[in-house]
Image: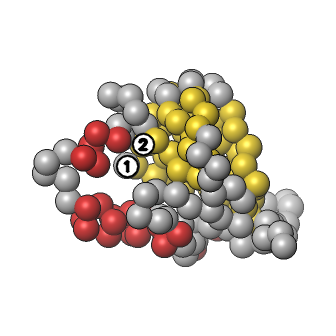
Amino acid sequence: MVSRLVWATEPEPTLPFDGTDQTLAVTSIVPPLSGTRFLVVTFPPDSVFFAPGFDAEAAAAENLAISPGLAELFEADGMHATPTVDYGIVLDGEIWLELDDGRAEFLHRHDVVVQNGTRHAWRNKSNRPATLAFILIGARKGK
């Protein structure tokens, strides 16, 4: 898995932009209320996670390092939810979006998904990586 934080804003950004790259100071991939994160994530095929030499401990440690604040929200089966509105765009490949109610949506290149704090998991059942772009906007959790 490869996760790249492209850009981040904190709440109430001001214009004109003063040239300060807020991305360098990010301590959590999950943005605060009204903050944003722009990520590009490449998901390996699920078969990688079931390969004989796969080191689950090392993978978990790596995920914590590259996705602080987000990795801690992952359940053992990959399901997770964030207090964000997420815009996702499939840039390359295909991937399944598994939802909390057991429903799964098959997404192809250029498909777009919008999530509102939804509990979900990404499943790459193909034999090649899938790359997605995500824009996360920090929001309040509903009651």
The circle on residue 1 is 1
Relative depth, front residue between 66 and 103:
103
Which disc number belongs to residue 43?
2
Residue 109 is labelled as none
Residue 137 shown left or right of residue 56 in the figure: right
| Location of residue 128 with respect to 23 vertically, above or below | above
Q: What residue is shown at x 46% (from left), y 41% (from top)?
A: 123
Q: Residue at x 35, y 41 (%)?
A: 46
- Label 2, secondary structure: give it: strand
Q: Is residue 19 visible?
A: no
Above or below, 104 relative to 2: above
Question: Residue 101: x percent and y percent?
Answer: 64, 49
Q: Residues within 10 Å of mark 1 (few under 14, many from 20)?
A: some
Amino acid at dot 2: Phe
Q: Position of residue 133 (x, y in %)?
A: 59, 42
Characterize the local packing of mark 2: few (<14), some (14-19) or many (20 or more) Cα atoms within 10 angstroms. many
Label 2 vs label 1: CA separation? 5 Å
Q: Position of residue 56 (x, y in %)?
A: 26, 61
